[in-house]
Image: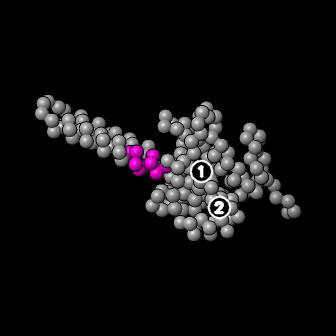
Amino acid sequence: MRATQELEAQATGRPPGTLSSSLTLYQKIIYPSLLISVFAIGTLTVLLSPGPKDSAVILAMLTLFGALMLRINMPLKRVRMDDQALHISNYKKEITVPLGNVAEVVESWWPKGYRVFVKFHSATEFGSRIVFTPKMRWLAWWSPHPVVAEIRGAVARAAGAGPVIPGAPRERHQPTGL
């Protein structure tokens, strides 16, 4: 992995910076696995204990809870960015997506923190959009996360449009000399 980062740094001029939280692996795999396991053990304890019980309701609740945990957390990706591309990993595979393929970057506030959604012009191996949790900012949950502006600015620079100034109207870059 270190050799890959050194090659990326030589090719782009700077090493990829990590945009996603260092807790992504925990949020994606460890946390849901632990909660589902604890809930399953509790379910088995209730089902194996003597006395009346409604096993269908208990199993339905376990299934619903497990599906919800997987739906919310499994899509999370680890995201790094350099001057030319996003480097996206699901912890099994890492892909490189040119910044020119980024169509839109939006953020959403979840009860468990921010989520950043990146939509692409054309589908990647991970689909037409990805989601990641950016690095945590203490006591700043009410304001937009700076990683969104950072990605938007990098996309604009890669397209030759210059820096993106938050709140400023966007101008189209017109080629000269035609």
**Residue that protrudes farthest toward the right in the picture:** 177
Q: Is residue 147 left or right of residue 92?
A: right
Kindly identify which numbered label has been placed on residue 15.
Answer: 2
Task: Give the percent coordinates (x, y) of residue 33.
Answer: 36, 47
Q: Going 54% across and 62% down the picture, which residue do you hit?
A: 95
Percent coordinates x, y for residue 35 in the rendering: 35, 42
Residue 12 percent location from the top left of the image: 68, 65
Type of amino acid at the residue the image marks with label 1: Leu
Q: Quadrant of residue 61?
A: top left
Q: Magenta-highlighted stretch: main secondary structure?
A: helix
In the depicted view, which residue is nearer to us: 138 or 113? 138
**Nearest to the observer: residue 125 or residue 52:** 52
Residue that appears at 55% across and 40% down = 114
Scheme of colours in the image: one colour
| Residue 178 appears in view | yes
Q: Which residue is mark 1?
A: 19
Q: Residues within 10 Å of mark 2 (few under 14, many from 20)?
A: some
Residue 26, magenta (yes or no): yes
